[in-house]
Image (cartoon, rainbow, N blue to C red):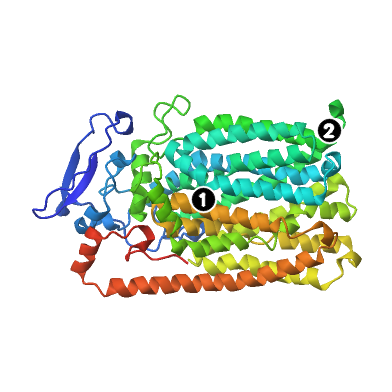
Amino acid sequence: MATVLTKGGSPPITISPPSDGNDSPTGSKGSNINVSLSSIPPLGVAIEERRFWFQRAKSYDPTAIATQVSVFDDPDTAEKYQPRPDWENIHRFDPLERWTWGEEHRLIRKIDWRIMVWACIMFMALELDRANISQALTDNFLGDLHMTTNDYNLGNSVFKLAFLCAELPSQLVSKWMGPDRWIPSQMVLWSIVATAQFWLSGRTSFLACRALLGILQGGFIPDVILYLSYFYKHHELSLRLGFFWTAMSIADIASALLAYGLLHMRGVQGHAGWRWLFLIEGLMTLVIGIFAFVLMPAGPCHTASWFRGKNGWFTEKEEKIMVNRVIREDPSKSDMHNREPITPRLLWQSLKDFDLWPIYILGLVFQIPMTPIAQYLTLTLKGLHFDTFQANLLTIPYTVVHMITMLGITYLGEIFNELTFIAASGQIWALPFLIYLNSVDTAGVNRWVIYAVTTLLLGYPNAHPIQVGWNSRNSNTVRSRTVSAACYNMFVQAGGIVSSNIYRKDDAPLYKRGNKQLLAICCMNIALYILVKAYYMFRNKQKARKWEAMTAEERLEYLANTTDKGNKRLDFRFQH
């Protein structure tokens, strides 16, 4: 059942729920309620929302109405933004729904526990299986397989290239099947390949497994991000993405601790420790993938199942709050059904969206100054005469620092409503350490000094969560958000391919040439962030000039008849 607004003698806006009885309450099919303006319940006071618990003042009133003004509160604009009749949450859409701040914050905590925690666990499984190659290196992995560091670089490049190529197809499959079906399928498939690395026999099998892992893992991250966007507002998603990538860092710490134990299994049944590492961690992912089939609901209003309970995780009131608070903030989230495929035409429209390419370019280059140092950290520590187990444990401190700084800048970006310059802080952080590595003879420096510099460098505040959320905000349609999430991550993986080929065998062991290249790219990145900021300010001024030149009647006419979609609409402003 959908509630619609009418004024005067104008005809009602008819919104019919889907014909599938499973998607709507019994007896609600095809019905609407028409409400006059005089009977609309009051909205919450228009205040600047305190987005995080530590920002809430003593005057915070959990019983105050939290429902804020949106386009659905004016019949003139509401008609232009009405959700599609086949939208999966249409039976919970109600412009008259009101809720309190206390109800909203309790619901967000519930969503965090039910949805976000499991998303983080799945991401940790992904990270275990794609990053345990670094731990394997310390257990004579290259020697056992008769490979060189160039072969290792090639394996990293093959993995990232396969990962990159699978991003967009995976996202399209996910949009067609639904992420609740596709993500668990991915996990089960790649866990089988990860486990099969136990039987690696040489360079060919190593490259084949890296390619298969890349193909099967590609698209997982944008798939999960699109899935989370069904439950969270924009600023909430940005913060949750900070925790999402923190889960990756936690997985890196867990991986180092697991490696410390599993690599001690060298000699068990006559096998190397790294073989047991791949086998056991792969089986762990398989178990998580199987559970994902029953722990991922299709959407906010579809949590009921034999495993999650016949009444689902959320009450009817909670479902209404979830749906309406998200759609009131961003009406574009009702543009597509969650199992609606992207057509070739829509795909092309999204790919040619030039306004998102500045963020894609940032995704290509922003991690390059740090990635080669991170990839070679365990080998570097071995070269500094730390043993296998010390080398793995010494990777933990930088991961802890990295988690803290990444969460810190994610919070700051939302608190100060400044994305570009906060995201650029990672480059500024890395700059002095890269200058140091290029200014001293690292061969003659105490190994603990090199370790400290490297640890601080790799503890940089990673802008990845900010930029993923930034990309999602500036997409402004489900169609564009689906494709842009994959495109952004493809550029990130392309940057990984570049990173994997900066440290070369002929530059070992000090990599002086490589370090100069990293310093140059870092300086370039700082300038690039400034240019991106300038671009989005320019585009917003262009839009504002046209929009403000219109009369109120012309604006309504534009909203009713425009063919502009997503971020091309004149009433949309780019975040920066």
- Tell me if residue 478 can be seen: no
Question: In the rendered image of this protein, does residue 524 appear above or below residue 109?
Answer: below
Residue 70, percent from left and from top: 30, 57
Determine whether, in the image, residue 162 is placed left or right of residue 302. Answer: right
Name the residue: 84% across, 71% down: 440
Q: Earlier in the sequence, mark 1 or mark 2?
A: 2
Q: Residues within 10 Å of mark 2 (few under 14, many from 20)?
A: some
Q: Disc 1 residue type?
A: Ala
Q: For the residues labelled 1 and 2, say whether their Cβ atoms are less than 8 Å apart.
A: no
Residue located 70% across and 49% down the image? 156
Q: Nearer the viewer, residue 425 or 351?
A: 351
Q: Residues within 10 Å of mark 1 (few under 14, many from 20)?
A: many
The residue where tag 2 is placed is 265
In the displayed structure, 141 sits above or below 246; it is: above
Q: CA distance from mark 1 to mark 2?
A: 39 Å
Front residue of 340/415: it is: 340
**Place of residue 78 in the rendered image (x, y in percent of width and height, measured from the top left):** 24, 54
Q: Identify the residue shown where x is 57% and y is 71%.
A: 528
Q: Position of residue 295 (x, y in %)?
A: 51, 33
Q: Quadrant of the N terminus?
A: top left
**Going by the image, does 1 lie left or right of 337?**
left
Kind of element beneath mark 1: helix
- Count the labels in the image: 2
Q: Residue at x 71, y 31 (%)?
A: 196
Q: Is residue 161 left or right of residue 21?
A: right
Q: Position of residue 274 (x, y in %)?
A: 80, 37
Disc 2, SS: helix
Q: Is residue 442 visible?
A: yes
- Residue on which disc 1 sits: 486
Badge 2 amino acid = Met
Q: Nearer the viewer, mark 1 or mark 2?
A: 1
